[in-house]
Amino acid sequence: MEARDNADRHRQRQQKLKEQVDARVAAATEQKGILIVFTGNGKGKSTAAFGTATRAVGHGKTVGVAQFIKGQWDNGEYNTLHPLGVEFHIMGTGFYLGDAKPGSGHSGRDSGLAGGQANAGRPGL
């Protein structure tokens, strides 16, 4: 009996929350874009970013990608998404192995961030 009561209370709380969210969505009067930045060590950043971009394009949204890559080889993400209207800004200065000089990778990062910032507030993107 207690489990059913807990489930009922949970359902009621979720319904109340849904009503609040629905009211805020209905009251929204302006369209806003969204900027998502994927960072961190390890794997998964590109997968998350391109999965999100693909879903957005599939829903008719305008998408721009600032991609930091490690070399000048063929880019499958670009080849797939650019024909669908995704705007790409590709930056990167290559691999750094061992003891890279302090600051040696920052110029590519900084120019990439500047390109991303320039487009972040652009209407329609």
Image (tube, rainbow, N blue to C red):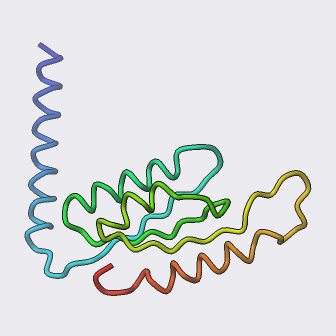
13 relative to 33, above or below: above
12 relative to 54, above or below: above
Residue 123's x, y, as percent?
31, 86
Q: Quadrant of residue 110?
A: bottom right
- The residue at the point 28 percent across, 82 percent down is 124
| Quarter of the rendering occupied by the N terminus | top left
User: Which residue reaches farthest top?
Assistant: 1
| Quarter of the rendering occupied by the C terminus | bottom left
Task: From the viewer's side, name the closer residue of 24 and 50.
Answer: 50
Residue 35's x, y, as percent?
41, 70
Figure label count:
0
- The residue at the point 10 percent across, 45 percent down is 15
44 relative to 22, above or below: above
Residue 3's x, y, as percent?
17, 17
- The residue at the point 16 percent across, 16 percent down is 2
Task: From the viewer's side, name the closer residue of 23 and 114.
Answer: 114
Residue 47's x, y, as percent?
46, 48
Q: Is residue 70 left or right of residue 119?
A: right
110 relative to 55, above or below: below
Q: Is residue 95 left or right of residue 88?
A: right
- The residue at the point 45 percent across, 68 percent down is 65
